Image (spheres, helix red, strand yellow):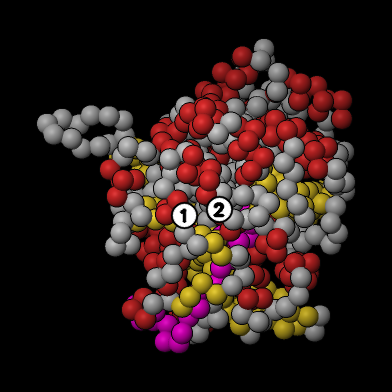
Amino acid sequence: MSAFAAVDLGASSGRVIVGRVLDDADGPRVTLHEVNRFPNGPVRVPPVAAPATTGEATLFWDVLHLYRGVLDGLRAATREVGTLAGVGIDSWAVDHGLLDVDGRLLGNPVHYRDARTDGIPEKVFATVPAAELYARTGLQVQPFNTVFQLVAAQGTAALAAARQALLVPDLLGAWLTGVPVAEVTNASTTGLLDATTRTWALDVADRLGIDTRLLPPLRDPGVLLGHVRDDVRADVGHHAPLPVWTVGSHDTASAVVAVPATRPDFAYVSCGTWSLVGLELDAPVLTEASRAANFTNEAGVDGTVRYLKNVMGLWVLQETLRVWNEAGLPADLPDLLAAAAQVPPLTTVVDVDAPDFLPPGDMPARLAAAAVRTGQSPPQTQGEVVRCILDSLALAYRRAVRQAVSLSGRDVQVVHVVGGGVRNELLCRLTADATGLPVVAGPVEGAALGNVLVQARAAGVLSGSLADLRTVGARGLDLHRYEPGGPGMPGAAQWSAAEARAFA
């Protein structure tokens, strides 16, 4: 048995999971056990100026809290297994910490939902046109892309003092090892990586006034980053050398490794706070039609391309539950899902990817406003609100899968759903019906499983291709298959009519 620690950081929580690679009669398999979970969320902090406070508050990540959670998790993992064969870190994309000339953090990373990038994409495109930037980086336009964040920070004292920018998992890895790099799957979400060569587009950065010294050396997933520093290792109680391996540090890259696909003609939905819907390709799709559809080409493990679209995901539901909780309303998710299942399908649907749904706030009110704008009756009961969210997510998945197929020329016969959304049976059934394709749901901890699989291969515990890793990862998984056209599901004509309403 070999044991690895997967540090998997999401937008609402972080966790450290011990993955054990076991030898069974049928071949190696992986078991996962969570040893530490800790909350993660934004902190809104106003600036302080004398004699009075001026300016808008900024939304930050509490990265020191995250680092402490990682150390606590490594301490717990060491107590559980004794000696670890490695550590790998994955997280969300785009956000970064700025380091000064001494390698010290200049401040907490700004949260991607902060408003500082409002209007910045247009400013960037005035210098590097959108079509030119897409042809080079293949990245969809999201207002929080790292390139837009760095341009938004121009003129600030922090950026003036910065000598390096490290994405969140790279920052934590550097604190553990002292080695600052940019792992390529996450670097591909910055808008500053050439999608074809997988090298920094230094000329693009230079044209935008971004100091190219901020961009650290690139590393592929599946190599040794370094070893945990002696003082850190002593602090967590690990008495043997502890390697840190690069993995697909963008959590979606790790989740896609864990997709239990047995054939190449699959689509995936990595379903969590965000939903990432797309295909695995051998080369980027850099056409004008792809840009117009706002599809992204992000680097995957083993040279693959994650050709996908960001869908707002379960964030809308999470924020809805938060608003109800704060208002003292019942917000038990199983009961709400049961109530939603009794609501007639496709009564009210909205475009969940509209900008209104990106920042924190009153999601039920925003859903009602979106319904009114499109000539629909707003949902009234809590069950109707939840059903509106789930129907709308399924419509967004349907649209994204169909666009991906059309734009890439790749046929799709099955949709794999991985991540926390696997537990939402109603959403899985709706996804099968909306796409007209069977849905295979599982694993829940997709990012952690993919993280461990890549570590294990890097350490020599496993070997083979990406397909071989998926075979190992699939052993022992509790997978559920949903067929389209189940009881109470709408027909294809109803989905088409609903799509026309939602995206009017």
Q: Choose between 202 and 41: the one closer to the eye.
A: 202
Look at the numbered disc 1 and give the secondary structure of its residue.
loop
Q: Residue at x 41, y 36 (%)?
A: 152
Q: Which residues are magenta?
A: 233-255
Circle 1 crowding by C-alpha within 10 Å: few under 14, some 14–19, many from 20:
many
Q: State the image quarter where residue 73 is shown.
A: bottom left
Rendering coords of residue 305 (x, y %): 71, 53
Quadrant location, the N terminus: bottom right
Mark drawn on residue 186 = none
What is the tally of numbered marks visible in this picture?
A: 2
Quadrant location, the C terminus: top right
Q: Which residue matches tag 2?
A: 200
- Whether the residues at callouts 1 and 2 have beta carbons within 8 Å, the answer is yes
Q: Choose between 207 and 240: the one closer to the eye.
A: 207
Rendering coords of residue 184 (x, y %): 58, 58
Rendering coords of residue 216 (x, y %): 47, 59
Q: Which residue matches tag 1?
A: 215
